[in-house]
Protein backbone atom coordinates (compact mmCIF):
# COMPACT_ATOMS: atom_id res chain seq x y z
CA UNK A 1 0.00 0.00 0.00
CA UNK A 2 1.33 3.43 -0.96
CA UNK A 3 0.38 5.80 1.85
CA UNK A 4 2.43 8.90 0.97
CA UNK A 5 0.57 11.89 -0.37
CA UNK A 6 0.04 11.85 -4.11
CA UNK A 7 -1.77 13.64 -6.95
CA UNK A 8 -3.75 12.06 -9.75
CA UNK A 9 -4.46 13.63 -13.14
CA UNK A 10 -7.79 12.23 -14.36
CA UNK A 11 -9.60 12.18 -17.70
CA UNK A 12 -13.24 11.59 -18.54
CA UNK A 13 -14.37 11.49 -22.18
CA UNK A 14 -17.00 8.74 -22.22
CA UNK A 15 -19.79 10.77 -23.84
CA UNK A 16 -20.13 14.43 -24.79
CA UNK A 17 -18.21 16.18 -22.00
CA UNK A 18 -14.44 16.48 -22.05
CA UNK A 19 -13.24 16.71 -18.47
CA UNK A 20 -9.80 16.88 -16.84
CA UNK A 21 -9.21 17.00 -13.09
CA UNK A 22 -6.46 16.92 -10.51
CA UNK A 23 -7.27 15.25 -7.19
CA UNK A 24 -5.02 14.37 -4.27
CA UNK A 25 -5.01 11.35 -1.98
CA UNK A 26 -7.22 13.18 0.56
CA UNK A 27 -10.00 13.45 -2.05
CA UNK A 28 -9.33 17.19 -2.39
CA UNK A 29 -10.30 18.29 -5.89
CA UNK A 30 -7.58 20.74 -6.98
CA UNK A 31 -9.26 21.35 -10.33
CA UNK A 32 -12.11 19.78 -12.27
CA UNK A 33 -12.70 21.37 -15.68
CA UNK A 34 -15.56 20.31 -17.91
CA UNK A 35 -15.95 21.37 -21.51
CA UNK A 36 -19.55 20.61 -22.53
CA UNK A 37 -20.20 20.07 -26.21
CA UNK A 38 -23.17 22.25 -27.08
CA UNK A 39 -22.78 21.27 -30.76
CA UNK A 40 -25.12 18.29 -30.22
CA UNK A 41 -28.10 20.43 -29.19
CA UNK A 42 -29.42 20.91 -32.71
CA UNK A 43 -29.59 17.12 -33.13
CA UNK A 44 -31.52 16.52 -29.89
CA UNK A 45 -28.96 13.95 -28.75
CA UNK A 46 -25.26 13.12 -28.85
CA UNK A 47 -23.73 12.42 -32.28
CA UNK A 48 -20.85 10.01 -31.53
CA UNK A 49 -18.56 11.08 -34.37
CA UNK A 50 -18.88 14.76 -33.49
CA UNK A 51 -18.26 13.92 -29.83
CA UNK A 52 -14.93 12.15 -30.48
CA UNK A 53 -13.69 14.90 -32.78
CA UNK A 54 -14.48 17.56 -30.18
CA UNK A 55 -12.73 15.58 -27.42
CA UNK A 56 -9.68 15.48 -29.65
CA UNK A 57 -9.87 19.21 -30.20
CA UNK A 58 -10.33 20.08 -26.51
CA UNK A 59 -8.25 17.66 -24.53
CA UNK A 60 -4.79 19.26 -24.81
CA UNK A 61 -5.79 22.79 -23.84
CA UNK A 62 -8.15 21.52 -21.13
CA UNK A 63 -5.26 19.53 -19.61
CA UNK A 64 -3.07 22.65 -19.56
CA UNK A 65 -5.84 24.65 -17.90
CA UNK A 66 -6.65 21.94 -15.36
CA UNK A 67 -3.00 21.75 -14.30
CA UNK A 68 -2.70 25.52 -14.17
CA UNK A 69 -5.84 25.85 -12.05
CA UNK A 70 -4.80 23.04 -9.70
CA UNK A 71 -1.61 24.81 -8.67
CA UNK A 72 0.48 21.69 -9.33
CA UNK A 73 2.67 20.95 -12.32
CA UNK A 74 2.99 17.82 -14.39
CA UNK A 75 6.06 16.92 -12.31
CA UNK A 76 3.84 16.79 -9.19
CA UNK A 77 1.52 14.23 -10.80
CA UNK A 78 1.94 10.64 -9.57
CA UNK A 79 -0.52 8.77 -11.79
CA UNK A 80 -2.86 9.22 -14.74
CA UNK A 81 -6.44 7.94 -14.46
CA UNK A 82 -8.98 7.52 -17.23
CA UNK A 83 -12.48 6.10 -17.71
CA UNK A 84 -12.45 3.15 -20.13
CA UNK A 85 -16.02 1.81 -20.06
CA UNK A 86 -18.93 2.06 -20.56
CA UNK A 87 -19.44 4.84 -23.08
CA UNK A 88 -19.16 5.82 -26.72
CA UNK A 89 -16.20 3.87 -27.99
CA UNK A 90 -14.71 6.68 -30.12
CA UNK A 91 -14.99 9.14 -27.25
CA UNK A 92 -13.46 6.74 -24.72
CA UNK A 93 -10.56 6.02 -27.06
CA UNK A 94 -9.61 9.70 -27.25
CA UNK A 95 -9.28 9.93 -23.46
CA UNK A 96 -7.54 6.58 -23.15
CA UNK A 97 -5.05 7.26 -25.94
CA UNK A 98 -4.20 10.66 -24.51
CA UNK A 99 -3.85 9.27 -20.98
CA UNK A 100 -1.63 6.45 -22.24
CA UNK A 101 0.60 8.85 -24.15
CA UNK A 102 0.99 11.07 -21.13
CA UNK A 103 1.61 8.17 -18.74
CA UNK A 104 4.20 6.63 -21.07
CA UNK A 105 6.05 9.87 -21.81
CA UNK A 106 6.22 10.84 -18.11
CA UNK A 107 6.86 7.32 -16.82
CA UNK A 108 3.68 7.44 -14.72
CA UNK A 109 1.35 4.58 -13.82
CA UNK A 110 -1.93 4.38 -15.73
CA UNK A 111 -5.15 3.64 -13.83
CA UNK A 112 -8.30 2.62 -15.70
CA UNK A 113 -11.71 3.30 -14.16
CA UNK A 114 -15.23 2.09 -14.88
CA UNK A 115 -17.35 5.18 -15.52
CA UNK A 116 -20.29 3.97 -13.39
CA UNK A 117 -17.99 3.23 -10.45
CA UNK A 118 -16.66 6.75 -10.99
CA UNK A 119 -20.20 8.11 -10.54
CA UNK A 120 -20.47 6.28 -7.22
CA UNK A 121 -17.10 7.68 -6.08
CA UNK A 122 -18.43 11.21 -6.72
CA UNK A 123 -20.09 10.66 -3.34
CA UNK A 124 -16.78 9.90 -1.63
CA UNK A 125 -15.30 13.29 -2.50
CA UNK A 126 -17.48 15.05 0.08
CA UNK A 127 -17.79 11.98 2.31
CA UNK A 128 -14.36 10.30 2.35
CA UNK A 129 -15.56 8.01 5.15
CA UNK A 130 -18.38 6.55 3.05
CA UNK A 131 -17.85 2.83 2.76
CA UNK A 132 -19.91 -0.23 1.82
CA UNK A 133 -22.17 -2.00 2.51
CA UNK A 134 -24.70 0.17 0.67
CA UNK A 135 -27.32 -0.01 -2.06
CA UNK A 136 -26.44 2.27 -4.97
CA UNK A 137 -28.97 3.56 -7.45
CA UNK A 138 -26.94 4.51 -10.51
CA UNK A 139 -29.07 6.59 -12.85
CA UNK A 140 -27.69 8.39 -15.86
CA UNK A 141 -28.34 9.05 -19.53
CA UNK A 142 -27.36 5.52 -20.50
CA UNK A 143 -27.81 3.49 -17.29
CA UNK A 144 -30.25 2.58 -14.58
CA UNK A 145 -28.92 0.07 -12.12
CA UNK A 146 -29.55 -0.92 -8.54
CA UNK A 147 -26.35 -2.35 -7.12
CA UNK A 148 -25.56 -3.82 -3.70
CA UNK A 149 -21.98 -3.03 -2.75
CA UNK A 150 -20.93 -5.53 -0.09
CA UNK A 151 -17.48 -3.95 -0.18
CA UNK A 152 -15.71 -1.82 -2.81
CA UNK A 153 -14.57 -4.91 -4.72
CA UNK A 154 -17.54 -7.13 -4.25
CA UNK A 155 -20.87 -5.99 -5.61
CA UNK A 156 -24.04 -7.52 -6.93
CA UNK A 157 -26.32 -6.09 -9.60
CA UNK A 158 -29.81 -6.35 -8.13
CA UNK A 159 -31.71 -4.78 -11.01
CA UNK A 160 -31.17 -2.91 -14.23
CA UNK A 161 -33.21 -1.36 -16.98
CA UNK A 162 -34.47 -3.74 -19.61
CA UNK A 163 -34.60 -0.96 -22.21
CA UNK A 164 -34.24 2.82 -21.81
CA UNK A 165 -32.37 4.51 -19.00
CA UNK A 166 -34.07 6.96 -16.61
CA UNK A 167 -32.08 9.87 -18.06
CA UNK A 168 -33.17 8.86 -21.55
CA UNK A 169 -36.82 9.12 -20.45
CA UNK A 170 -36.14 12.70 -19.33
CA UNK A 171 -34.23 13.51 -22.52
CA UNK A 172 -36.76 12.02 -24.92
CA UNK A 173 -39.72 13.74 -23.25
CA UNK A 174 -37.90 17.04 -23.39
CA UNK A 175 -37.33 16.48 -27.09
CA UNK A 176 -41.03 15.76 -27.67
CA UNK A 177 -41.95 18.94 -25.82
CA UNK A 178 -39.28 20.98 -27.66
CA UNK A 179 -37.46 21.75 -24.43
CA UNK A 180 -33.93 21.09 -25.69
CA UNK A 181 -31.15 18.70 -24.63
CA UNK A 182 -30.29 17.43 -22.03
CA UNK A 183 -33.87 17.14 -20.83
CA UNK A 184 -33.32 16.29 -17.15
CA UNK A 185 -32.36 19.72 -15.80
CA UNK A 186 -35.11 21.56 -17.70
CA UNK A 187 -37.84 19.07 -16.73
CA UNK A 188 -36.66 19.20 -13.12
CA UNK A 189 -36.99 23.00 -13.16
CA UNK A 190 -40.40 22.98 -14.88
CA UNK A 191 -41.73 20.21 -12.63
CA UNK A 192 -41.35 22.47 -9.61
CA UNK A 193 -44.13 24.65 -11.05
CA UNK A 194 -46.39 21.79 -12.17
CA UNK A 195 -48.88 19.32 -10.72
CA UNK A 196 -47.47 15.77 -10.50
CA UNK A 197 -51.03 14.35 -10.45
CA UNK A 198 -52.04 16.15 -13.67
CA UNK A 199 -51.70 12.95 -15.71
CA UNK A 200 -50.89 9.40 -14.60
CA UNK A 201 -48.12 8.03 -16.81
CA UNK A 202 -47.37 4.27 -16.53
CA UNK A 203 -45.00 2.83 -13.91
CA UNK A 204 -43.58 -0.31 -15.51
CA UNK A 205 -42.58 -3.54 -13.68
CA UNK A 206 -44.33 -2.24 -10.60
CA UNK A 207 -44.27 -5.62 -8.88
CA UNK A 208 -42.90 -6.71 -5.53
CA UNK A 209 -39.43 -8.28 -5.58
CA UNK A 210 -38.79 -7.27 -9.18
CA UNK A 211 -35.89 -4.84 -9.11
CA UNK A 212 -35.52 -4.34 -12.85
CA UNK A 213 -36.65 -1.15 -14.54
CA UNK A 214 -38.28 -0.33 -17.87
CA UNK A 215 -38.83 3.13 -19.30
CA UNK A 216 -39.56 2.50 -22.97
CA UNK A 217 -43.33 2.13 -22.32
CA UNK A 218 -43.28 5.50 -20.61
CA UNK A 219 -41.66 7.00 -23.68
CA UNK A 220 -44.41 5.54 -25.89
CA UNK A 221 -47.09 6.74 -23.45
CA UNK A 222 -45.72 10.28 -23.64
CA UNK A 223 -45.47 10.13 -27.40
CA UNK A 224 -49.11 9.05 -27.69
CA UNK A 225 -50.22 11.64 -25.12
CA UNK A 226 -48.44 14.50 -26.88
CA UNK A 227 -49.60 13.42 -30.34
CA UNK A 228 -53.25 13.80 -29.36
CA UNK A 229 -52.92 17.32 -27.94
CA UNK A 230 -52.79 20.66 -29.72
CA UNK A 231 -49.86 23.04 -29.34
CA UNK A 232 -51.70 25.54 -27.14
CA UNK A 233 -52.61 22.81 -24.64
CA UNK A 234 -49.05 21.55 -24.53
CA UNK A 235 -47.66 25.04 -24.04
CA UNK A 236 -50.07 25.88 -21.19
CA UNK A 237 -49.54 22.51 -19.50
CA UNK A 238 -45.79 22.12 -20.04
CA UNK A 239 -45.04 22.28 -16.34
CA UNK A 240 -47.86 19.85 -15.45
CA UNK A 241 -46.66 17.31 -18.02
CA UNK A 242 -43.07 17.68 -16.80
CA UNK A 243 -44.17 17.19 -13.18
CA UNK A 244 -46.30 14.12 -14.05
CA UNK A 245 -43.48 12.57 -16.07
CA UNK A 246 -40.92 13.22 -13.34
CA UNK A 247 -43.24 11.71 -10.76
CA UNK A 248 -43.64 8.53 -12.86
CA UNK A 249 -39.86 8.13 -13.14
CA UNK A 250 -38.84 8.94 -9.59
CA UNK A 251 -41.68 7.04 -7.92
CA UNK A 252 -40.56 3.76 -9.45
CA UNK A 253 -36.85 4.46 -8.82
CA UNK A 254 -37.49 5.20 -5.16
CA UNK A 255 -40.01 2.39 -4.64
CA UNK A 256 -37.68 -0.32 -5.92
CA UNK A 257 -34.64 1.06 -4.08
CA UNK A 258 -36.54 1.26 -0.80
CA UNK A 259 -38.10 -2.19 -1.24
CA UNK A 260 -34.66 -3.68 -1.75
CA UNK A 261 -33.16 -1.70 1.12
CA UNK A 262 -35.80 -3.14 3.45
CA UNK A 263 -35.45 -6.64 2.07
CA UNK A 264 -31.65 -6.73 2.32
CA UNK A 265 -31.60 -4.69 5.57
CA UNK A 266 -29.16 -2.21 4.07
CA UNK A 267 -28.47 0.83 6.22
CA UNK A 268 -27.05 3.17 3.56
CA UNK A 269 -28.31 4.24 0.13
CA UNK A 270 -26.15 6.02 -2.43
CA UNK A 271 -27.45 7.93 -5.47
CA UNK A 272 -25.15 8.37 -8.46
CA UNK A 273 -25.17 9.52 -12.09
CA UNK A 274 -26.63 12.55 -13.86
CA UNK A 275 -30.22 11.87 -12.74
CA UNK A 276 -29.10 11.99 -9.08
CA UNK A 277 -29.15 15.78 -9.57
CA UNK A 278 -32.95 15.61 -9.79
CA UNK A 279 -34.48 17.56 -6.93
CA UNK A 280 -37.65 15.45 -6.85
CA UNK A 281 -35.67 12.21 -6.69
CA UNK A 282 -33.47 13.52 -3.87
CA UNK A 283 -36.45 14.77 -1.87
CA UNK A 284 -38.55 11.60 -2.21
CA UNK A 285 -35.59 9.28 -1.53
CA UNK A 286 -34.62 11.42 1.48
CA UNK A 287 -38.08 11.17 3.06
CA UNK A 288 -38.40 7.43 2.39
CA UNK A 289 -34.90 6.73 3.74
CA UNK A 290 -35.65 8.82 6.84
CA UNK A 291 -38.70 6.63 7.57
CA UNK A 292 -36.42 3.58 7.61
CA UNK A 293 -33.59 5.37 9.45
CA UNK A 294 -31.39 4.67 6.44
CA UNK A 295 -28.63 7.16 5.64
CA UNK A 296 -28.82 8.66 2.15
CA UNK A 297 -25.86 10.00 0.18
CA UNK A 298 -25.94 11.92 -3.07
CA UNK A 299 -23.17 13.85 -4.79
CA UNK A 300 -22.95 17.64 -4.77
CA UNK A 301 -24.71 19.00 -7.89
CA UNK A 302 -21.47 19.88 -9.66
CA UNK A 303 -20.31 16.25 -9.40
CA UNK A 304 -23.53 14.53 -10.55
CA UNK A 305 -22.95 14.87 -14.28
CA UNK A 306 -19.91 13.43 -16.03
CA UNK A 307 -16.66 14.85 -14.65
CA UNK A 308 -13.06 13.75 -14.26
CA UNK A 309 -12.83 14.38 -10.49
CA UNK A 310 -15.02 11.31 -9.87
CA UNK A 311 -12.71 9.23 -12.09
CA UNK A 312 -9.71 10.48 -10.10
CA UNK A 313 -11.54 9.70 -6.84
CA UNK A 314 -12.16 6.11 -7.94
CA UNK A 315 -8.47 5.82 -8.89
CA UNK A 316 -7.17 6.70 -5.41
CA UNK A 317 -7.82 3.27 -3.91
CA UNK A 318 -6.35 1.62 -7.02
CA UNK A 319 -3.20 3.75 -6.70
CA UNK A 320 -2.80 2.72 -3.06
CA UNK A 321 -3.03 -0.92 -4.13
CA UNK A 322 -0.68 -0.37 -7.12
CA UNK A 323 -3.52 -1.67 -9.28
CA UNK A 324 -2.15 -0.29 -12.54
CA UNK A 325 -3.14 -0.90 -16.17
CA UNK A 326 -0.73 -1.83 -18.93
CA UNK A 327 -0.22 0.34 -21.99
CA UNK A 328 -2.16 -2.16 -24.10
CA UNK A 329 -5.32 -1.52 -22.05
CA UNK A 330 -8.40 -1.10 -24.21
CA UNK A 331 -11.65 0.85 -23.96
CA UNK A 332 -14.98 -0.87 -24.44
CA UNK A 333 -18.53 0.35 -24.70
CA UNK A 334 -20.06 -2.40 -22.50
CA UNK A 335 -22.97 -1.17 -20.42
CA UNK A 336 -23.08 -1.37 -16.68
CA UNK A 337 -20.75 -2.26 -13.86
CA UNK A 338 -19.83 -5.77 -15.00
CA UNK A 339 -16.33 -4.92 -16.15
CA UNK A 340 -14.41 -2.83 -13.71
O1 LIG B 1 -24.17 10.75 -15.81
P1 LIG B 1 -24.45 11.64 -16.94
O2 LIG B 1 -23.83 13.02 -16.95
O3 LIG B 1 -24.05 10.97 -18.29
C1 LIG B 1 -24.12 9.61 -18.52
O4 LIG B 1 -23.25 8.87 -18.00
O5 LIG B 1 -25.11 9.22 -19.19
O6 LIG B 1 -26.04 11.75 -17.04
C2 LIG B 1 -26.66 12.52 -18.00
C3 LIG B 1 -28.15 12.37 -17.79
C4 LIG B 1 -28.98 13.03 -18.91
O7 LIG B 1 -29.94 12.10 -19.35
C5 LIG B 1 -29.64 14.20 -18.18
O8 LIG B 1 -30.90 14.55 -18.73
C6 LIG B 1 -29.77 13.66 -16.78
O9 LIG B 1 -28.56 12.98 -16.56
N1 LIG B 1 -29.93 14.73 -15.78
C7 LIG B 1 -31.03 14.88 -15.02
C8 LIG B 1 -30.84 16.05 -14.25
N2 LIG B 1 -29.60 16.55 -14.54
C9 LIG B 1 -29.06 15.72 -15.48
N3 LIG B 1 -32.16 14.16 -14.97
C10 LIG B 1 -33.12 14.58 -14.13
N4 LIG B 1 -33.01 15.69 -13.36
C11 LIG B 1 -31.89 16.45 -13.38
N5 LIG B 1 -31.79 17.53 -12.62
ZN1 LIG C 1 -22.07 9.38 -16.64
Image (spheres, rainbow, N blue to C red):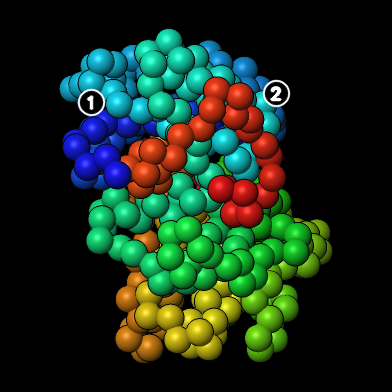
Does the numbered disc 2 mark a residue whose Cβ is under 8 Å from ligand 1? no
Snapshot quadrant of residue 107: top left
Q: Residues within 10 Å of mark 1 (few under 14, many from 20)?
A: some
Q: Which residue is mark 1?
A: 70
Query: Which residue matches tag 2?
Result: 49
Q: Residue at x 32, y 76 (%)?
A: 295
Q: Residue furthest top?
A: 105
Between marks 2 and 1 in the image, the one whose residue lies nearer the viewer: 1
Q: CA distance from mark 2 to mark 1?
A: 31 Å
Residue 256 against residue 80 in the figure, above or below: below
Whole-percent x, y for residue 199 in the image: 65, 76
The kind of secondary structure element at disc 2 is helix
Q: Is residue 314 left or right of residue 234?
A: left
- Left or right of 21: which side holds 12? right
Task: Say left or right for 281 vs 247.
Answer: left
At x 36%, y 28%, the residue is 79
Q: Is residue 140 above or below residue 8?
A: below
CA neighbours of label 2 inside 10 A, class few (<14), some (14 to 19), many (20+): few
Above or below: residue 95 compared with residue 137: above
Amino acid sequence: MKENSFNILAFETSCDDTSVAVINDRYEVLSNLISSQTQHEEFGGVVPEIASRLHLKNIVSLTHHALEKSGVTLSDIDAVAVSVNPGLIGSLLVGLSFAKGLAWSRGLPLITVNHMVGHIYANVIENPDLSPPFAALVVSGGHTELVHFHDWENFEIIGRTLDDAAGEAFDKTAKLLNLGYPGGPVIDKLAKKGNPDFHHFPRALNVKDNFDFSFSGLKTAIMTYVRDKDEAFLEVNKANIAASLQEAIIEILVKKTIQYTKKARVKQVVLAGGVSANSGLRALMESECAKLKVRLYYPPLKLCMDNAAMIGAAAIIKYKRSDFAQLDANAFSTKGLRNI
